[in-house]
């Protein structure tokens, strides 16, 4: 465990998830914002990937909730989740940037799950006075960490798309 980042594997078929994401993009239910972060957009105003009404997505949501509960060593209740799909490729004109999530709320966890990486890089976490830490190239595993850790998403380096899921859990 580096920087407090913990791993929680998920038993979901990555090919089935990619097919769901690609079909949702084609049908227009999954749209891209300016940062090329793809998010499901709902008619009722919700904008959260893990709220999509699909059994596989519901399993993903509960796997993220379970991973966060295990990270903190307690059953998490009274929470809110914000989640999205990140799709990137070599000639994507939008570059990833260093950022953190929710620095004002110490009771927030973030999670990253790689669905498909190819040769593309993983997320980088800077470390004071030493080389940065890169998440391992493990698919279908939630990497859970405190949301205020600065990080830089990996960049797609080939024309084949790189797929990852990200989520934040706000407790309280």
Image: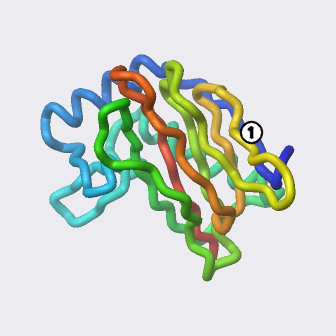
Picture residue at 46% right of the left edge, 60% below the top: 82
Q: Tell me: residue 58, above or below residue 140.
A: below
- Quadrant location of the C terminus in the rendered image: bottom right
Q: Position of residue 9 (x, y in %)?
A: 68, 31
Q: Tell me: residue 10, above or below residue 69.
A: above
Q: Position of residue 27 (x, y in %)?
A: 13, 34
In the picture as drawn, the residue positioned furthest to the bottom comes out as: 104
Q: Is 4 or 41 nearer to us in this picture?
A: 4
Quarter of the figure with residue 143: top right
Q: Position of residue 78 (x, y in %)?
A: 59, 71
Give the secondary structure at mark 1. Answer: strand
Picture residue at 48% right of the left edge, 42% below the top: 165
Q: Position of residue 168 (x, y in %)?
A: 55, 60
Is residue 63 visible from the viewing direction of this image? no
- Quadrant location of the N terminus in the rendered image: top right
Number of numbered discs visible in the structure rendering: 1
Q: Residues within 10 Å of mark 1 (few under 14, many from 20)?
A: some
Q: Is 69 or 96 nearer to us in this picture?
A: 96
Quarter of the figure with residue 83: bottom left
Q: Is 132 or 43 nearer to us in this picture?
A: 132
Quarter of the figure with residue 86: top left
Q: Which residue is mark 1?
A: 7
Image-based side of 69 in relation to 168, left or right: right
Is residue 21 visible from the viewing direction of this image? yes
Picture residue at 58% right of the left edge, 28% below the top: 140
Q: Tell me: residue 10, above or below residue 94.
A: above
């Amino acid at each position: 465990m580096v920087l407090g980042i913990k791993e929680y594997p998920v038993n979901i078929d990555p090919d089935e998830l990619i097919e769901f994401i690609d079909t949702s993009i084609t049908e227009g239910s999954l749209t891209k914002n300016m940062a090329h972060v793809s998010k499901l957009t709902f008619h009722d105003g919700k904008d959260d990937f893990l709220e999509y009404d699909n059994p596989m997505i519901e399993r993903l949501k509960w796997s993220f909730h379970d991973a966060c509960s295990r990270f903190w060593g307690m059953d998490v209740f009274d929470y809110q989740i914000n989640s999205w799909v990140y799709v990137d490729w070599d000639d994507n004109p939008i570059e990833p940037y260093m950022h953190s999530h929710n620095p004002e709320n110490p009771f927030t966890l973030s999670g990253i799950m790689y669905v498909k990486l190819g040769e593309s890089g993983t997320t980088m976490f800077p470390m004071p006075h030493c080389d940065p830490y890169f998440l391992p190239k493990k698919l279908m595993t939630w990497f859970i960490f405190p949301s205020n850790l600065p990080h830089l998403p990996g960049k797609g380096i080939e024309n084949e798309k790189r797929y990852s899921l990200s989520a934040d859990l706000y407790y309280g």
